Amino acid sequence: MENPGLIVHGRAAPFSTALRSLVNNPRYSDVCFVVGQERQEVFAHRCLLACRCNFFQRLLGTEPGLGVPSPVVLSTVPAEAFLAVLEFLYTNSVKLHRYSVLEVLTAAVEYGLEELRELCLEFVVKVLDVELVCEALQVAVTFGLGPLQERCIAFIEAHSQEALRTRGFLELSATALLPVLRSDKLCVDEAELVQAARSWARVGAAVLERPVAEVAAPVVRELRLALLAPAELSALEEQNRREPFIPGEQIVEAWKCHALRRGDAARDAPCRRRRGTLPRDHHRFLDLRFK
């Protein structure tokens, strides 16, 4: 009976180092990518990309001569993120950075690289901070990354005031903002949350060239106006006349809660406290048990 033989392994480090030297090396390369808005040229090797990633196999063709001609334009992925993807494909390892990991994660998801995606997710959780969390939440919502979304929401709940002041918060989509505004565990008072939501809507209105109220419509119902004191609600109503932001009927529902002194006076006007809600005299009349 013939001996089946035994697979033996050499040292992985020199092999990985040798392959890393081929990343973006024009020598022996047979495909050139034009990457990102800067249109940076990146050199690679068809056979290696095709055998490691189905996305590139489809993009470059499965047989010599049948692939798309060089250069291949990939304008949506930043050059640094694309080079990180190549590094992973060539060496099965990658050096990640806090400032670019979300771009690498996005590329990994779009290219179907599950192992790289998981490595990026683990890294994001380790380096998550106030400046990164809203950007990470947006990526999580966009690509349906449930566990990452949960971690981001929990972080925002614990650092609400700081997170609401970041550029990332102002750039959230309405879909990403909704789970934040629905949370009972935000460590922020409702008055501050209303102002943060208004600032968010103003930025969206400027970018989309749409009215503030129209931009705010998908999320504004999650603001718990009945938690505001009468003087605060009056000031909000006056500001709302000058700059429409909240539907008038939502403010009326909040006034009903004050007039009837019951948290259930208006079915669509949430009165439940958040973790950071500051006490007000009228709260004793409402159903304010924190959940």
Image (cartoon, helix red, strand yellow):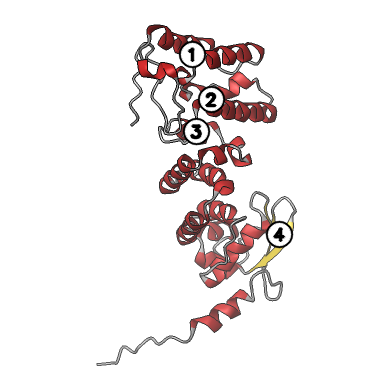
Quarter placement of the N terminus: bottom left
Tell me the mark number nearer the camera, choosing from 4 and 2: 2
Query: Which residue, given by chain and number where applicable, does mark 4 sit on?
Result: 71
Label 2 vs 1, first from the N-terminus = 2
> How much space separates mark 3 and mark 2, taking CA atoms?
8 Å
Residue 76 x, y percent position in the rendering: 65, 49
Mark 1 or mark 3, which is nearer the start of the sequence?
3
Looking at numbered disc 1 in the image, what kind of residue is underneath it?
Gln
Q: Do the numbered discs 2 and 1 sit on residues whose CB atoms are within 8 Å?
A: no
Residue with the mark numbered 2 = 191
Q: Position of residue 246 (x, y in %)?
A: 55, 17
Secondary element at tag 3:
loop
The residue nearer to you, when weighing 38 against 148, is: 148
User: In terms of sequence position, does the residue under pointer 1 or pointer 4 come before the other?
Assistant: 4
Task: Name the residue type under label 4.
Answer: Pro
Kind of residue sitting beneath label 3: Val
Local SS, label 4: loop
Q: CA distance from mark 2 to mark 1?
A: 15 Å
Residue at 51% across, 70% down: 92
Whole-Å distance between the Cαs marked 3 and 1? 21 Å
Depth check: give the residue in front, 153 or 108.
153
Closer to viewer: mark 4 or mark 3: 3
Disc 1 from disc 4: Cα separation? 55 Å
Front position among marks 3 and 1: 3
Question: Which image quadrant for residue 45?
Answer: bottom right
- Count residues near mark 1 (Cα–Cα under 10 Å), then give few for <14, some for 14-19, many for 20+: some
Question: What residue would you read off at disc 3?
Answer: 188
Task: Work out whether mark 4 precedes mark 2 in sequence or the reverse, and give the earlier one.
Answer: 4
Residue that numbered label 1 is attached to: 250
* Mark 2 closeness class: few <14, some 14–19, many ≥20 residues within 10 Å: some
Question: Which type of secondary structure does the marked residue at label 2 adopt?
Answer: helix
